[in-house]
Amino acid sequence: QVQLVESGGGSVQAGGSLRLSCAASGYSISTRCMGWFRQAPGKEREAVVRIYSSYTGGTSTNYADSVQGRFTISQDIQKNTLYLQMNSLTPEDTAMYYCAAGAFRGCSVGYPNYWGQGTQVAVSS
């Protein structure tokens, strides 16, 4: 059974940093498309970033324009954990952040298919 458990959210001032973690179980994160979404109050859930591995071992990432250059996704295969390093945070980054996993290695089909419970990020000005 696939499980995703996020942690690391909190309250920070603008300009600060947070690192979110997503501990996965039931499969290896290296074999699935993985990513982060966020949902601010009154807004639709939006994709933040995704990462996927090729069969040759390389990885590719896709970032939303709004976080490009400030957020970095990474994964620790041994710990089976996905991370999101968030720097230069602004109040516009305030949202519930969700970890997501796909059904397959690629992202074009079956992603997102599994969700974590979310972790709240609040950025004050």
Image: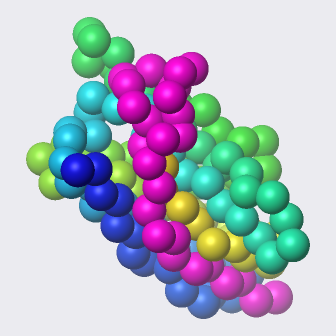
Name the one closer to the observer, 108 or 89: 108
Name the one closer to the observer, 5 or 48: 5
Q: Residue at x 63, y 72 (%)?
A: 96
Q: Position of residue 54 (x, y in %)?
A: 35, 16
- Furthest-top residue in view? 56
Residue range highlighted in magenta: 101-125
Q: Position of residue 51 (x, y in %)?
A: 46, 35
Q: Position of residue 69 (x, y in %)?
A: 66, 47
Q: Quick check: 42 left or right of 99?
A: right
Q: Quick check: 15 left or right of 81?
A: right
Magenta segment, principal secondary structure?
loop
- Furthest-front residue in view? 1
Q: Taking 85 as reference, is 59 above or below it? A: above
Name the one closer to the observer, 72 or 82: 82
Give the image quarter of residue 77: top left
Q: Position of residue 84 (x, y in %)?
A: 47, 57
Q: Residue at x 87, y 72 (%)?
A: 42
Q: Is residue 81 visible in this depiction of the protein?
A: no
